[in-house]
Image (cartoon, coloured by chain):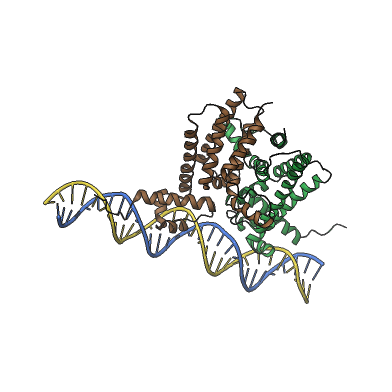
Chain colours: A green, B brown, C blue, D yellow
Amino acid sequence: MTKPVKRRDAKKSKKLILDCAIKLFSTNGYSSTSMEELAKMCDLNKAMIFYYYKTKQGLYEAVIIQILDEIYATIIKENTDISKPMEELESFVKTYALFACSHSYLPSLLLRELSDSGAQMPETLFSHMRKLYILFASILDRGVKKGCFEDVIPMIVYFMVVGTLNLMVTTKPLRIKAHEIDGIDTCSTCDMDEISEYLIKKIKKMLKEK
Amino acid sequence: MTKPVKRRDAKKSKKLILDCAIKLFSTNGYSSTSMEELAKMCDLNKAMIFYYYKTKQGLYEAVIIQILDEIYATIIKENTDISKPMEELESFVKTYALFACSHSYLPSLLLRELSDSGAQMPETLFSHMRKLYILFASILDRGVKKGCFEDVIPMIVYFMVVGTLNLMVTTKPLRIKAHEIDGIDTCSTCDMDEISEYLIKKIKKMLKEK
DNA sequence: CCTCATTAACCAACTGATTAGTTAATTATA
DNA sequence: TATAATTAACTAATCAGTTGGTTAATGAGG
């Protein structure tokens, strides 16, 4: 029984709009993304975007929820059967790094939203961001209580990890270009595994008692 | 002889436009900044912006050059009579931190530009950014040669420092809000000195031989 | 000191393109 | 046939940039 080829498929259209919107919003930013352009990319009429998502802001928030739910679930999943804080930290960094690398719209979106001090940030994004930080901070906290870490300011450590990973992803093309122009070492050939390995090693050394 | 009060002052007007543009571009970003709004803020006719800066892009580049020239000069000046790599590193971090804090449009602008992988980045900004990184990398390099640092990947260390500082500045309002909502520790009362002291301490520990 | 020509500084009102969002009509499918 | 999915054509606002002109300062000649 082969289904007849559907020329109208609501779910497919709605999903298509979301997928294309993720690409456009993260490469062009919110205000430089045109709904007309998005419609053309989906090969759908612009009115369909408003039919499914009501407003541009509504679409943007749908995009954000999609991305952040995904990464949070991935990290939680990878951490289920780990109990040592040191290994949990390692798993958090590795999972975030891999996700950020394969879904490079995430770092773009986060950096862009943070760049204006979150003045326009939707509540959904803000609450998702806090959730992720709370997860990280709780790992550190358990580590301190178990005596694996010392002298921890969780917010700063969090940015040293997540901020650095985000920047290493978004600056990739620029770092390659800079290496070509000036011949300087910009880690332009490093892959994400090397980067997260180095980060983990250094963060461990930084927080370890002695 | 007191000069008559000038009702027309080209230099003053041009400067006024640049100063207001810095504020607007760094809080709203390039495409969300309206030239009409800028003109109103300066209490000048919109045509004057184009009279002095030709295009919006031209104005934007003038803004960038102004900011980055200033910070580079400040860092170089503070570093003149220091020779030990460890102290040079410390001075770089402290100077950058203070500057970023008191000129908070710099972190905003940088994060925003980097968030789209520098696709639209003006050449002037890119070359200024490289200059600053080269300065930082050369400090680390001297440190390695003198045996003060080991196992250094300069690009990653640079982002761990500068990226973290930028994020700590731009996220200040969000961190305060998050603390109020969730009661979590977001370093919301830390001042910039504490932050850079902690960063310096941790980076030193991270790079020290042994 | 006055006057007049020159020009720099300034502005109101416009253009043409683009924007988010709407509407009313039209298909396709169950 | 009922309704969900889709569309063309529209609105009203906003945008960067231009135009054609008006003032105010300046400097030279009388």
- A174 relative to B4 in the view: left or right: right
- B51 relative to B157 in the view: left or right: left
Q: Where is residue B188 in the image (x, y as percent from the top left)?
A: 62, 50
The residue positioned 71% from the left and 41% from the top of the image is A97
Quadrant, the C terminus of chain B:
top right
Of all residues, the one furthest to the top in this rendering is B146
- Image position of B178 with respect to C23: above or below: above
- B162 relative to A8 in the view: left or right: left
Of all residues, the one furthest to the right in this rendering is A1
Question: Can residue A63 be seen here?
Answer: no
Q: Nearer the viewer, residue A1 or B59?
A: B59
The residue positioned 62% from the left and 58% from the top of the image is A35
The residue positioned 67% from the left and 52% from the top of the image is A22
Q: Where is residue B150 in the image (x, y as percent from the top left)?
A: 65, 27
Question: Can residue A49 be seen here?
Answer: yes
- Image position of B82 with respect to B121: above or below: above
Asked where in the image residue A184 lies, by quadrant, the reply is top right
Q: Position of residue B124 (x, y in %)?
A: 50, 40
Number of numbered markers:
0
Asked where in the image residue B90 lies, by quadrant, the reply is top right
Q: Position of residue B147 (x, y in %)?
A: 62, 23
